[in-house]
Image (tube, helix red, strand yellow):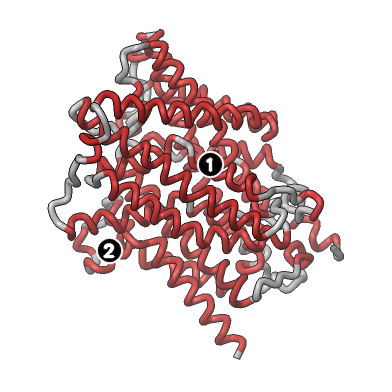
């Protein structure tokens, strides 16, 4: 690369292209990556929340499968540039948004990752709480110290902070320290999931009573009113990774490795683990007389202290492994993109951890409707337009040809207007706008009659609408300017 003074603040060791000899990931690596990331408690809760919402077992499993097949398409497409040029997501975003404008999608994606970090940290901390309260009953009777609006009890808050500190300790030690935990997770969590499946089938005397549980919807219109936002939520579940997948495909041996590896690993893993979640959650309705969609709450209903303790330790350790791999690495790169010379991986990880505290993650997953309709759909309305712009730019405008040197320069072709591509920014805003009325009504800022009903319902398709609108606007603007 030339012009060092012009690129010095746009490059760091974390953001530089991966040289060819270090691109060693094959098909199995990407398959294993997705198996590891799919086998997590939020995946279980994702499927079980559909049962709680009214679906029967096959409707829930099919919804999860369809969502993951759909999101696999932008996952593979955005992964192409990473595999071809060895560049991470924040750098690829510079091609379409500008060398400074790329901070917009990078920060939005990073903030979403911070939210996921907070959710996973709450899950791990709450698992610790469910274990410790068996041996230290006084944890249940600690005086309340938080405002009622926080919906936070003192005991779970203490274990949440303990688990948060453990995550920050791993960040301090570096990502390499998590390798043994990933191996532990790869063996223990599937075994724990299969054990839950065995318990569910055994206690209801076979799969028959579970699979015969009917849908709670009385008509097709009721079903589809829930199905489409649920499908958007399924796509939104991995909408973050569909953007920053170049952070992983930059290490690919070939395009074939990332394409086949992801195709084998993503949808089958998510569907299988979701099936277990669906079966176990359906069984809880028969065994306990109520649907228990959170596996930690379910485990706490068992009587054996040691069995509960072992289960909670396994959940905590596997959650720790997932959190570092899925929710620290990418936002650390995104925050580093703000100031490559000042923010390294560790500092980016600390920023992620602090924001993860401030988003009140326990409120996001307090109930299925908040998890799907507020969290998953809301952020998919932001990430869908970014994905549409990046894919149109890379495949249709640039024909998969990038000038890598200029991605790290202030005087290159990606400088646009003072570092910002106004066309991309305008297309992003236009892509988000259709989902705003529905979002404002979903969080009860506005009444349902504040906008036309059809406009509010667009929120249920926010990822799809945002992706399509932003892609069309971006492509139309640039094609018009070419003429």
Instruction: Name the secondary structure under disc 1.
Output: helix
Classify 10 Å Cα crowding around label 2: few (below 14), some (14-19), many (20 and above): many
Residue 454 sits in which quadrant?
A: bottom left
Q: Please name whichever residue, 117 or 46, is drawn nearer the observer in this view of the structure.
A: 46
Residue 216 spot, x, y in % from top left:
17, 46
Residue linked to disc 1:
35
User: Residue at left 45%, top 57%?
Assistant: 69
Asked whether residue 334 appears in the rendered view, the answer is yes
Where's the N terminus, which quadrant? bottom right
Instruction: Name the secondary structure under disc 2.
Output: helix
Residue 348 spot, x, y in % from top left:
64, 42
Residue linked to disc 2:
456
User: Residue at left 73%, top 45%?
Assistant: 342
Q: Please name whichever residue, 290 or 438, is drawn nearer the observer in this view of the structure.
A: 290
**Mark 2, mark 1: which one is toward the viewer?**
1
Pointer 2 with pointer 1, Cβ within 8 A: no
- Identify the mark nearer the N-term, 2 or 1: 1
Residue 66 spot, x, y in % from top left:
39, 56
């Amino acid at each position: 690369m030339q012009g060092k003074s012009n690129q010095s603040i746009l490059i760091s060791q974390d953001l530089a292209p991966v040289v060819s000899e270090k691109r060693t990931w094959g098909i199995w690596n990407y398959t294993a990556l997705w198996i590891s990331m799919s086998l997590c408690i939020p995946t279980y809760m994702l499927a079980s929340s559909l049962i709680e919402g009214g679906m029967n077992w096959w409707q829930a499993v099919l919804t999860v499968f369809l969502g993951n097949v759909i999101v696999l398409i932008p996952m593979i497409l955005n992964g192409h540039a990473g595999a071809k040029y060895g560049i991470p997501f924040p750098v690829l975003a510079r091609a379409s948004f500008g060398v400074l404008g790329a901070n917009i999608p990078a920060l939005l994606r990073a903030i979403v990752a911070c939210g996921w970090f907070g959710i996973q940290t709450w899950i791990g901390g709450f698992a610790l709480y469910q274990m410790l309260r068996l041996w230290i009953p006084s944890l249940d009777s600690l005086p309340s110290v938080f405002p009622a609006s926080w919906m936070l009890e003192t005991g779970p808050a203490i274990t949440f902070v303990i688990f948060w500190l453990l995550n920050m300790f791993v960040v301090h030690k570096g990502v390499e320290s998590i390798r043994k935990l990933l191996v532990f997770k790869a063996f223990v969590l599937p075994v724990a999931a299969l054990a839950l499946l065995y318990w569910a089938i055994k206690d209801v005397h076979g799969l028959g009573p579970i699979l015969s549980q009917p849908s709670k919807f009385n008509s097709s219109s009721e079903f589809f009113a829930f199905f489409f936002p649920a499908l958007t939520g399924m796509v939104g579940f991995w909408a973050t990774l569909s953007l920053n997948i170049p952070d992983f495909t930059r290490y690919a041996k070939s395009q074939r490795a990332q394409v086949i590896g992801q195709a084998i690993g993503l949808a089958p893993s998510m569907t299988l683990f979701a099936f277990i979640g669906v079966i176990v959650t359906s069984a809880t309705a028969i065994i306990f007389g109520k649907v228990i969609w959170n596996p930690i709450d379910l485990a706490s209903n068992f009587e054996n202290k040691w069995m509960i303790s072992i289960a909670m330790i396994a959940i905590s350790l596997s959650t720790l492994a997932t959190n570092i791999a899925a929710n620290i690495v990418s936002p650390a790169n995104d925050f580093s993109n703000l100031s490559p010379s000042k923010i390294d991986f560790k500092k980016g990880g600390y920023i992620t951890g602090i924001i993860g505290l401030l988003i009140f993650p326990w409120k996001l997953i307090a109930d299925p409707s908040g998890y799907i309709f507020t969290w998953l759909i809301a952020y998919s309305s932001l990430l869908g337009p970014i994905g549409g712009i990046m894919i149109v730019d890379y495949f249709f405008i640039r024909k998969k040809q990038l000038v890598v040197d200029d991605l790290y320069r202030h005087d290159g072709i990606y400088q646009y207007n003072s570092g910002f591509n106004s066309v991309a920014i305008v297309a992003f805003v236009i892509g988000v706008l259709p989902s705003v009325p529905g979002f404002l009504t979903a969080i009860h800022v506005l009444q349902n009659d504040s906008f036309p009903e059809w406009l509010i319902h667009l929120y249920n398709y926010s990822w799809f609408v945002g992706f399509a609108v932003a892609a069309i606007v971006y492509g139309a603007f640039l094609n018009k300017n070419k003429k």
